[in-house]
Amino acid sequence: MTAAKPRRKKSATPKRPTPPPPAQPVVLEVSGLTKRFGGVVAVDGVSFTVRRGTIFGFVGPNGAGKTTTLSIATGLMRPDAGTVTVRGADVWADPIAAKRMIGVLPDRMRLFDLLTGAQLLYYCGVLHGLDRETARSRTTDLARSLGLDDALDRPVRDYSIGMIKKISLAAALIHSPALLVLDEPFEAVDPVSTQLASDVLRRYADAGGTVVLSSHNMDFVERMCDHVGVIVGGRMLTAGSMDEVRDGLRLEERFVELAGGRQAVEGLEWLTTFSD
Ligand SMILES: Nc1ncnc2c1ncn2[C@@H]1O[C@H](COP(=O)(O)OP(=O)(O)OP(=O)(O)O)[C@@H](O)[C@H]1O
């Protein structure tokens, strides 16, 4: 007789959108990615697929390999091994076709910050092939939806960190790409703006857009994403629907479990011996 497996405590979870049906076509296929920086293996054989209409959360501890993976996935960095395709177009063999379908918000993006917000969005739109009228009207729509209307005429170099994230998100969205890849999009963004931007992303995904985003905010990922992948030490430990990955726990609990648990606070006794 086998011992009964102890049941996990079911935690209350925030409300989330229903996952899209599994029959949706694959939009992003990442296969066997590996990237080394000298002696550091930043990404170690990472594979995952993301289907149309999915909001995929990519989570992992600091230095786990999220930014490196997302940089390779969007063609900003070459891997040592592995392939990435976007709707079947290889990001390295067919970069123009692949990149046309991607909107990117990279970590630490450098913007043409002498332009005003309106000029920046307009030029992003025109560079992506939009006609002038469409670029102008989408600039206005995005600024309104993301709470940036009042800032549109100011130079981007005067923006706060959160405002830069929002204008970068607008720049990634302006050509209405099939795939959005966002590296920590809501870092330093206030809760009201996060809500506005979340609504924009959900509407985009409901209409068939596909989102991959990284974040350290587990509650946000659990609320926002229907699929999730956990990367630790360059390896994708698990990826699947939110419920599969959570396995009855809150995402944060499951993440801490997978990422190695809490470190004992040993060797810090001096911290409690105050100098005065
Ligand atoms: N250009 C680089 N040169 C050398 N090492 C790098 C470079 N970029 C990343 N690394 C290393 O690769 C590993 C993965 O880094 P990466 O930025 O992908 O992690 P991350 O999961 O995005 O981390 P964080 O959550 O802290 O942003 C780290 O050990 C990092 O120091």
Image (spheres, rainbow, N blue to C red):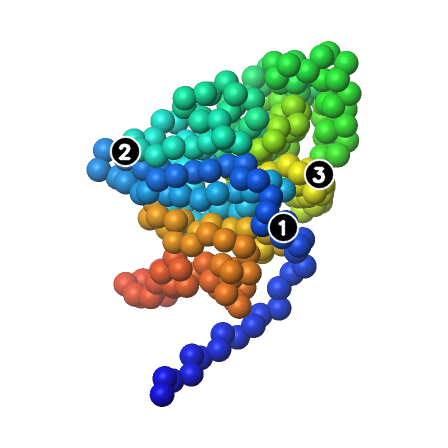
Is 243 situated above or below 207? below
Mark 2: which amino acid?
Answer: Phe
Determine whether the residue tagged by mark 1 lies in a helix, strand or loop. loop
Whether residue 188 is visible: no
Residue at disc 2, CB closer than 8 Å to ligand 1: yes
Q: Are marks 2 and 3 in contact (CB under 8 Å)?
A: no
Q: Which residue has dot 1 on it? A: 21
User: Residue drawn at (46%, 52%), measured in percent from left and top?
Assistant: 239
Q: Residues within 10 Å of mark 3 (few under 14, many from 20)?
A: few
Mark 2 / mark 1, whichever is N-terminal: 1
Mark 1 nearby-residue class (10 Å; few <14, some 14–19, many ≥20): few
- The image position of residue 13, as x and y in percent, is 62, 64
Tag 2 secondary structure: strand
Q: Which residue is at a point 62% across and 22% down the rendered structure image? A: 156
The answer to whether residue 117 of the structure is visible from this angle is: yes
Q: Amino acid at mark 3?
A: Ala
Return the residue at label 2: 37
Q: Is ligand 1 within 8 Å of the beta carbon of the residue shown at mark 1?
A: no
Instruction: Give the side of residue 214 with respect to residue 62, left or right.
Output: right
The residue under label 3 is 207
